[in-house]
Amino acid sequence: MKITRIETIPIQIPIEPTRATRGARGSHLTSPFLLVRIHTDEGLTGLGEVSCTPGWSGEDQVTAAHIIARYIAPRLIGENPTEVERLTATMRTAVANNPFTKSGLEIALWDLLGKSVGLPVYRLLGGPVRDFVPTKYSVSGLAPERAAEIAAWAVAQGFRTMKVKVGIEPEEDIARVRAVREAVGPDVRLGVDANGGWSARTAIRTIRRLEEFNIYFAEQPVPDLDVAWLSDVRAHVSVPVMADESVYTLQDAMAVVRAGAADVLSVYIGKGGGIGPARKVAAVAEAAGLTCTIGSNLELGIANAAMIHLAMATPGIGAEEFPCDILSPFFYEDDVLAEPLPITGGSARPTERPGLGVALDEEKVAHYRVG
Ligand SMILES: [Mg+2]
């Protein structure tokens, strides 16, 4: 089997206005994503999604399409798409950075490998280490009353774990977490995600005050510029510290481990450039006695499917203790999948269909296509 053509489709699906997320890095109001279709000479097609967030990695649907067409497609066309590991290395050297763009192609390669042998991706990765993937909700950094309403709504949807966006203004952050705790009661597990919005000093002081509300992790309390800042915070608070923005690559994960900067790593399909790189980050965490969760930048269905396969088959992802952010169907008005994934409030499951197990609804793709 050989790759004959790589097609990219810029799309944008509206976010339900009352769900738009606000955090320390701004508000996520639109998702200018890129669908990827890898065509082959045997008629099989691999599906991928570049779920890029410009404020995170500097990628958007225009840069992603350009990088693929100009630098990566010429290196992949004519190659055997089932040689996923080798082609991942090819992409790494074809152009620097742009991990979310590369991940859109990498998951399409996994999709093709699965389709070519008739197995779902999680079985190719070694099979299930859990029956389903526990998931959590993310409560936007809004005014306390509004955040409390959203949290109560999330409980009604079935979520028993959630995180609250903080890192915006300490007093307001504390008021928000207090309101959410009062709304959800004592039995819902609550973490906080500051998206790097606090200084180390503010983080230490604020996290200590938040302990009153029984928070069980503090995600990316300080900016991602120096892991020593994260280590400082971790040395002075008792709740587990999670590194998200600080960990993109395998080497980032190693640096966090060496610095003793975190208890939990938040892995994404996008940050490292695909499912394979994310599994390596999880293995580093496992070797160091840490655990991982899966974070989100509001992926659409194709990337959600990839996240589910990753979590199903990766022991280094401790989804029972730190449920994954496979939550975007609760944020979007629609998706481009022909059939929605089995994602509910609190759990996500893969399908048994080959590859990623998803198909596109072509009418919806045409409807949400932009530019
Ligand atoms: Mg995060």
Image (cartoon, grey):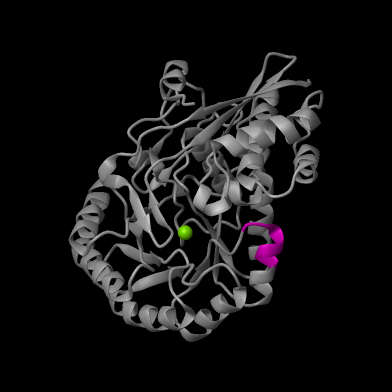
Q: Does 362 sit above or below residue 161?
A: above
Going by the image, does 303 lie left or right of 89? left
What residue is shown at x 81% (from left), y 23% (from top)?
A: 78
Going by the image, does 253 lie left or right of 56? right
Q: Which residues are magenta?
A: 248-254
Going by the image, does 248 lie left or right of 365? right
* 193 and 124: which is toward the camera: 193
Q: Does 308 sit above or below residue 149?
A: above
Instruction: Look at the image and say whether residue 323 sits in the magenta stretch.
Output: no
Quarter location, residue 252: bottom right
Q: Does 134 sit above or below residue 37?
A: below
What residue is shown at x 70% (from left), y 23% (from top)?
A: 116
Secondary structure, magenta segment, majority class: helix
What residue is shown at x 43% (from left), y 68% (from top)?
A: 197
Instruction: Look at the image and say whether residue 251 sits in the magenta stretch.
Output: yes
Residue 224 can be seen in this image: yes
Q: Does 344 sit above or below residue 228?
A: above
Q: Position of residue 334 (x, y in %)?
A: 36, 30
Number of disc labels: 0
* 17 and 176: which is toward the camera: 17
Q: Position of residue 72 (x, y in %)?
A: 74, 34
Going by the image, does 59 lie left or right of 209? right
What residue is shown at x 18% (from left), y 61% (from top)?
A: 145
Residue 110 can be seen in this image: no
* 322 and 194: which is toward the camera: 194
> Considering the image in quadrants, where does the N terminus appear?
top right
Q: Position of residue 112 (x, y in %)?
A: 67, 27
